[in-house]
Every structure is written in structure tokens, then in C-alpha cells.
Amino acid sequence: MQNRIICVLFAICFSGLSIAQETTTGDQDDFTEERVIIQDTVPSQPIDPLSPSKAAFYSAVLPGLGQAYNKKYWKIPIVYAALGTGVYFYIDNTNEYNRYRDAYKRRLAGFDDDEFWGTDTNGDPLSTPAISNDGLIRAQQSLRRNREISILVTLGLYALNIIDANVDAHLLQYNVDENLAVKPHLNFNELDATTNLGLTFNFKF
């Protein structure tokens, strides 16, 4: 009788172990199938060391072309507005300088009919000019200086256009991915049940 009871208990235990083993194997299979591999979703962008040089070269050949190369299209109107302003003042100062110079040359030739001499109510030339010869000379000197300043400002804006394209190309390749970051973090202190706020600097190779 005892032998039968032992055999029955042994059979029950063996069946339980088999069921448990099958269940464990089934759970492992399910776990294997549901396993998810998380990959980096922010890949590092390749760095082109020649990109800043290309942008500067394009802007030197044609102002605004470097900004287009950097895809900063909104800067192109600003570049041409700045350069156009410098060119406008250069042309205006040149035209005014030529007016005063031509009038001064006519006076040296003995004429008194230039636009700066002036006329009376009858339209006859005045006995003395409204703007003297010295006034014409001072006007020419002032306009020549303004014209030179306009040239320098235009050249400075042209150089600034090249520098802007070069710096923009450098900044576009600045590393801002997850491998180099400063992040805030909360640290829970289990001893006194308080929360500490801090910053974490992460640098990954």
C-alpha cells in the first residue's frame, strides 16, 4: 500500500515539474519574441571640413551665394540691401562731385553761367557768384571724402558678407547631438525624503 502511495506522489511531482518546465520555456519564448532593441535615434551628422571654405568662396564670387549654400535664404535680401546702399551713396557723391568740379572748371575758363553762380529776377547773372570759387573747392573736397568713405563701407559690407557665410557654415556643423549634452536631473534622497535638482554633463565617445 505504501509503495502505491509513493508511486502516485512521484507521478504527481514529475507531472508538475514537466508542466512548470513547459510553462517556463513558453515564457522564455514569448519574452524572446517581444524583445525590442532600442537604437540611437539621433545619429551624428558627418562633418565636412571644406564646407566653410566653400561658403566663403561662393560669397566672394557672388554676394549672397554663400548664404544660399548655407540655406539661409532670408539673409540674401539683407546682403544686397546693404551693398546697394553703399553703392548708391558712392554714385550720388560722385555725381555731386562732378557737378561742382565742372562748375569750377568753367569759372577757371572765364564763364559765369554755371548753376552755382546764380541769377537775378531778370535771369541775368549776378555780379558776384552765390557760391564762391573757394566754396566750390570745399564742396569738392567734402564730396571726394564722402565718396571714399562710401567705397570703404561697401568693401567692408562685402567682406562681412563673406565672413557671415563662413561663420554660418561653421555653426551649421556644431555638434548638438545626444553624445554631448547638459541636462537637468532630479535626484531623490531616500534618507530625508527630499528631491535635489542638478545638472548632468554627458560626454559619450
Image (cartoon, grey):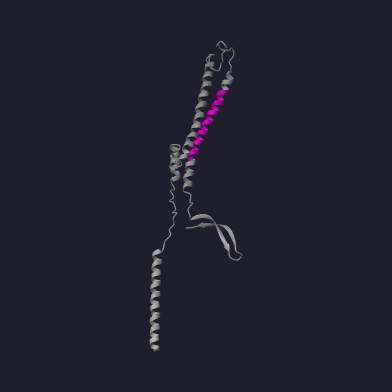
Q: Nearer the viewer, residue 43 or 112?
A: 43
In this rendering, the answer to whether 4 lies above or below 195 is: below
Q: Residue at x 53, y 18 (%)?
A: 103
Q: Residue at x 51, y 26 (%)?
A: 92
Assign the N terminus to one quadrant of the image: bottom left
The image shows residue 200 at horizontal and vertical percentages of 54, 57
The image shows residue 136 at horizontal and vertical percentages of 56, 20
Q: Is residue 159 magenta?
A: yes
- Residue lying furthest bottom: 1
Magenta-colored segment: predominant secondary structure: helix
The image shows residue 32 at horizontal and vertical percentages of 39, 66
Q: Residue at x 50, y 24 (%)?
A: 95
The image shows residue 178 at horizontal and vertical percentages of 48, 55
Q: Is residue 41 magenta?
A: no
Q: Nearer the viewer, residue 189 or 14?
A: 14
Q: Nearer the viewer, residue 89 or 36?
A: 36
Q: Which residues are magenta?
A: 138-162
Quick check: 53 left or right of 200? Answer: left
